């Protein structure tokens, strides 16, 4: 995926002292209705201005002390199924908004032009992943899938994700002291490794780091120090596929290395990664390695069905609470797949690694 050459690295000194927001609405149904200018305040979405839509147009004026992420929205009971609300950056200058059937946008100022360009790149990425997922599902339905084609699909999927993630990190790196960078960072934080997040926060300026959501992320990074490499594993309670109570301590610190694989049956990438880890375990199990799968599923039928269908032969745990699971909270997990390697004494040897990096780690240890 190509980058965006004009994402902001800085702002011009000739900044307007007020904003004018000019909007067009695609559907005459909204004429005579109120459109709200809103922003997030704590956990609430607060209206800061509003106006009537007349002849498919609306206008708002004001002064914005500092750029902030805002939203343009109608009352929920007025929304059409295909309606796309507008997320934009409210900053002084002329902002042109188009609310269309499926492709709403805000442009006209430097930050909003850059945000719109970023959104288009992300749309192209989403289209590519959807194409790959449709192809994968069709091959399963047609019974034309085999190990080789599944591997090819997995590699293509991973390649798209890797390229897109590098693009995201590049854009954030070009916007380390403005709200655009902070917004994109917060939007994609679950796709970044903890090391990526820590590096970004170390380089970010005060405008970036002082955003409320970013301060929360910074606190999380500080908590991660309690589960850093070299620290002892944190125990959690769960249950196995038969509903029996289990805890991680029944597998960890028992004199063998332990692969702890966090995944979910509804995640294609983590499901495939789980299969890779099973193969790695087969190769190294006689050298003193065990494996346990920890699922962030909420549906027990999907969880167990995928274990059986894909022959994921190893102990499996889940409390079926999804992202609210005790396991996810214990290890501050915000993305899957997520892999821990524990030493025989239960201390953390590696984390946040994929199966390829795990192979490299195991080669260092055993080969």
Image: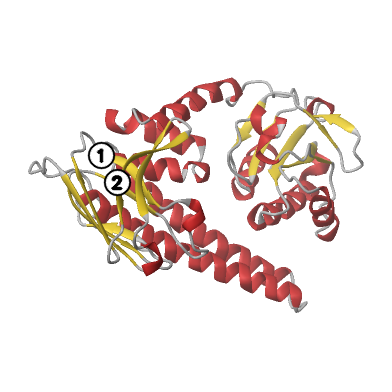
Q: Image check: 363 left or right of 52?
A: right
Q: Tell me the number on the disc at residue 1.
A: none
* Horizontal side, residue 319 vs residue 363: left or right: right
148 left or right, relative to 113: right
Q: Earlier in the sequence, mark 2 or mark 1?
A: 1
- Distance Cα–Cα, label 2 vs label 1: 6 Å
Image quadrant where one finds the N terminus: bottom left
Residue 242, position as x, y percentages in the image: 92, 42
Q: Residue at x 62, y 34 (%)?
A: 350
Residue 67, disc:
1
Dot 2 and dot 1 residues touching (CB under 8 Å):
yes
Quadrant of res 183: top left
Residue 195 in the image: state x and y as whole percent. Answer: 48, 35
Quadrant of the rendering where the C terminus is positioned: top right
- Compare residues 88 and 18 and report the one nearer the observer: 18
Q: Residue at x 80, y 25 (%)?
A: 249
The dot on residue 89 is 2
Quick one: which residue is furthest to the front in this view? Answer: 32
27 or 345: nearer the eye? 27
Residue 364: x %, y % from top left: 63, 39
Q: Position of residue 122 (x, y in %)?
A: 42, 59
**What residue do we see at 42% from left, 68% from top?**
101
Q: Is residue 349 visible?
A: yes
Disc 1 crowd, CA 10 A, few/some/many (<14, 14-19, 20+) = some
Identify the secondary structure beneath mark 2.
strand
Q: Residues within 10 Å of mark 2 (few under 14, many from 20)?
A: many
Furthest toward the left, the residue is 14
Q: Secondary structure at mark 1?
A: loop
Q: Quadrant of residue 95?
A: bottom left
Q: Is residue 55 left or right of residue 304?
A: left
């Amino acid at each position: 995926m190509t980058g965006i050459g004009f994402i902001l690295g800085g702002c011009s000194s000739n900044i307007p002292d007020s904003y004018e927001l000019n909007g067009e609405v695609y559907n005459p149904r909204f004429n005579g209705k109120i459109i709200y200018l809103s922003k997030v305040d704590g956990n609430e979405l607060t209206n800061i201005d509003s106006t009537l839509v007349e002849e498919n147009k609306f206008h708002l004026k004001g002064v914005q002390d500092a750029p902030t992420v805002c939203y343009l929205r109608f009352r929920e009971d007025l929304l059409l199924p295909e309606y796309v609300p507008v997320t934009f950056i409210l900053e002084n200058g002329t902002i042109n908004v188009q609310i269309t059937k499926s492709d709403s946008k805000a442009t006209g100022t430097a930050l909003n032009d850059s945000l719109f360009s970023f959104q288009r790149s992300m749309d192209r990425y989403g289209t590519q992943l959807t194409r790959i997922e449709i192809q994968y599902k069709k091959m399963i339905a047609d019974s034309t899938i085999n190990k080789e084609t599944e591997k090819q699909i997995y590699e293509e999927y991973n390649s798209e994700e890797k390229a897109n993630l590098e693009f995201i990190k590049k854009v954030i790196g070009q916007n380390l002291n403005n709200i655009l960078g902070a917004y994109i960072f917060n939007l994609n934080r679950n796709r970044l490794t903890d090391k990526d997040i820590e590096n970004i926060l170390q380089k970010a300026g005060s405008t970036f780091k002082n955003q409320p959501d970013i301060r929360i992320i910074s606190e999380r990074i500080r908590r991660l120090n309690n589960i850093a490499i070299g620290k002892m594993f944190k125990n959690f309670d769960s249950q196995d596929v038969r509903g029996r109570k289990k805890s991680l301590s029944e597998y960890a610190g028992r004199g063998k290395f332990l692969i702890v694989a966090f995944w979910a049956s509804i995640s294609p990438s983590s499901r495939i990664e789980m299969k890779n880890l099973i193969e790695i375990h087969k190769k190294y199990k006689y050298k003193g390695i065990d494996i346990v799968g920890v699922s962030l599923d909420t549906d027990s039928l999907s969880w167990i069905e995928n274990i059986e269908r894909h022959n994921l032969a190893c102990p499996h745990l889940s409390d079926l609470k999804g992202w609210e699971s005790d396991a996810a909270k214990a290890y501050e997990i915000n993305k899957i797949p997520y892999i821990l390697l524990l030493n025989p004494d239960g201390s953390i040897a590696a984390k946040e690694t994929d199966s390829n990096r795990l192979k490299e780690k195991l080669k260092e240890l055993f080969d």
